[in-house]
Image (spheres, helix red, strand yellow):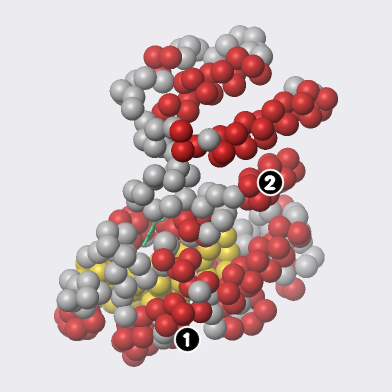
């Protein structure tokens, strides 16, 4: 496909997307297909010669779309909403059109600086304290692909921070979360090779602070090292809220990293009347939520803010001659 053909076909695709959104309510919400339906409908081997665009679009409509759950359908009420807007699709087109990467500031300075600016904007919108903003100094936000990645990275930063500050040789690290926390906390602990305690909830379905304190005390007296608590603002199963203020007091006293997983409900913090849900935020270490769930961005956009970004950039900041540049001291390299 050359530029001339691209100009024509791209406009057809844009029309298709606009038609899809305008008529989406006429579709069935969820797929009604049997396992193997697509595998059996397409050739076993890649075609030797290119297929024409009209045939591909026909396959897209007749073979692919029937196997898609239509998250933007007005009757889709399962799981979580998935953010979408025409403006966001245009942004994705521009970004795909450039097809760049931004491993360091020097590779594409615009990418790093734009990410710093917009994560600061969003951080201010949801009332994060100044320490969580790039303009504030040591902290800042970064864009990840998913809420799960945010939690794994927060846990990795917490590990780095804790191991740098302990005198014990390889302490056995313990993480805590509520039994209603998202499964990605289990995944993060498994990948991070740390013990996870799933703490019971109280009558409000919030992580029981009493049970947490008890568990931390028992672990400490058994020679283990409590290092990470993952609180949830809006749990996946029932949208319950952990008491961030109470947890921040406990974690501060115990010198434990407190991460707030607000993947879904954190989007509601753009409304000032919900800011109280993260009271205690001055003492938390990190927080993340997914604009791709409830704001107007399409996947993938999950944002992680840290009060001190150094342990994370230390984890990810592997160096190689080809990544070095003369502005390293004055810039952020997200890696
Ligand atoms: C959706 C959700 C996650 C996982 O987010 P992904 O982007 O799917 O990885 C984690 N925690 C909570 C509370 C969620 O709602």
In the displayed structure, 293 sits above or below 308; it is above
Which residue is at a point 44% across and 32% down the rendered structure image? 27
Instruction: Work out which residue is located at the far right of the displayed protein and give it.
Output: 4
Which residue is at a point 79% across and 29% down the rendered structure image? 7
In the displayed structure, 76 sits above or below 290; it is above
Please state which of the two labelled residues, at mark 2 or mark 1, is closer to the viewer: 2
SS state under label 2: helix
Q: Position of residue 151 (x, y in %)?
A: 42, 63
Choose between 295 and 331: the one closer to the eye. 295
Q: Quick check: which quadrant has ligand 1?
A: bottom left
Distance Cα–Cα, label 2 vs label 1: 36 Å
Mark 2 and mark 1 residues within 8 Å of each other at the beta carbon: no
Q: Is mark 2 within 8 Å of ligand 1?
A: no
- In the rendered image, the quadrant that contains the C terminus is bottom right
Q: Is residue 18 left or right of residue 182?
A: right
How packed mark 2 is, by other alpha carbons closer than 10 Å (few <14, some 14-19, many 20 or more), is: few
Q: Is residue 306 visible?
A: no
> To which quarter of the image does residue 192 belong?
bottom left
Choose between 57 and 100: the one closer to the eye. 57
Labelled disc at residue 273: none
Q: Residue under circle 2? A: 90
Which residue is at a point 71% across and 63% down the rendered structure image? 114
- In the rendered image, the quadrant that contains the N terminus is top right
Q: Earlier in the sequence, mark 2 or mark 1?
A: 2
Q: Residue under circle 1? A: 282
Q: Is residue 247 left or right of residue 325?
A: left
SS state under label 1: helix
Q: Is residue 147 left or right of residue 129?
A: left
Q: Position of residue 243 (x, y in %)?
A: 32, 80
> To which quarter of the image does residue 223 belong?
bottom left
Which residue is at a point 42% across and 61% down the rendered structure image? 264
């Amino acid at each position: 496909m050359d530029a001339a053909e691209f100009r024509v076909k791209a406009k057809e695709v844009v029309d298709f997307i606009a038609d899809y959104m305008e008529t989406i309510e006429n579709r069935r919400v969820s797929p009604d297909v049997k396992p193997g339906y697509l595998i059996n409908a397409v050739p076993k081997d890649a075609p030797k010669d290119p297929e024409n665009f009209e045939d591909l679009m026909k396959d897209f409509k007749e073979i692919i779309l029937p196997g898609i759950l239509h998250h933007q359908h007005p009757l889709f009420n399962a799981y979580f909403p998935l953010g979408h807007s025409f403006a966001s699709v245009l942004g994705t087109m521009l970004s795909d059109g450039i097809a760049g990467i931004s491993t360091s500031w020097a590779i594409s300075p615009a990418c790093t600086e734009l990410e710093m600016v917009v994560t600061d904007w969003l951080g201010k919108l949801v009332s994060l304290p100044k320490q969580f903003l790039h303009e504030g100094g040591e902290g800042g936000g970064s864009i990840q692909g998913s809420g799960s990645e945010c939690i794994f990275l927060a846990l990795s930063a917490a590990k780095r921070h804790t191991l740098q500050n302990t005198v014990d040789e390889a302490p056995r690290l313990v993480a805590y979360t509520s039994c209603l926390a998202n499964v990605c906390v289990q995944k993060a602990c498994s990948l991070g090779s740390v013990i996870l305690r799933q703490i019971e909830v109280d009558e409000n379905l919030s992580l029981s602070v009493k049970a947490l304190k008890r568990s931390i005390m028992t672990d400490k007296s058994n020679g283990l090292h409590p290092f990470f608590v993952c609180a949830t603002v809006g749990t996946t199963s029932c949208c319950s809220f952990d008491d961030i203020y109470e947890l921040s007091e406990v974690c501060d006293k115990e010198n434990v990293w407190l991460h707030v997983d607000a993947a879904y409900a954190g989007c509601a913090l753009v409304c000032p009347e919900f800011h109280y849900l993260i009271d205690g935020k001055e003492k938390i270490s990190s927080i993340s939520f997914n604009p791709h769930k409830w704001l107007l961005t399409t996947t993938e956009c999950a944002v992680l803010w840290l009060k001190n970004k150094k342990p994370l950039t230390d984890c990810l900041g592997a160096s190689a001659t080809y990544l070095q540049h003369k502005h390293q001291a004055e810039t952020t390299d997200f890696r």
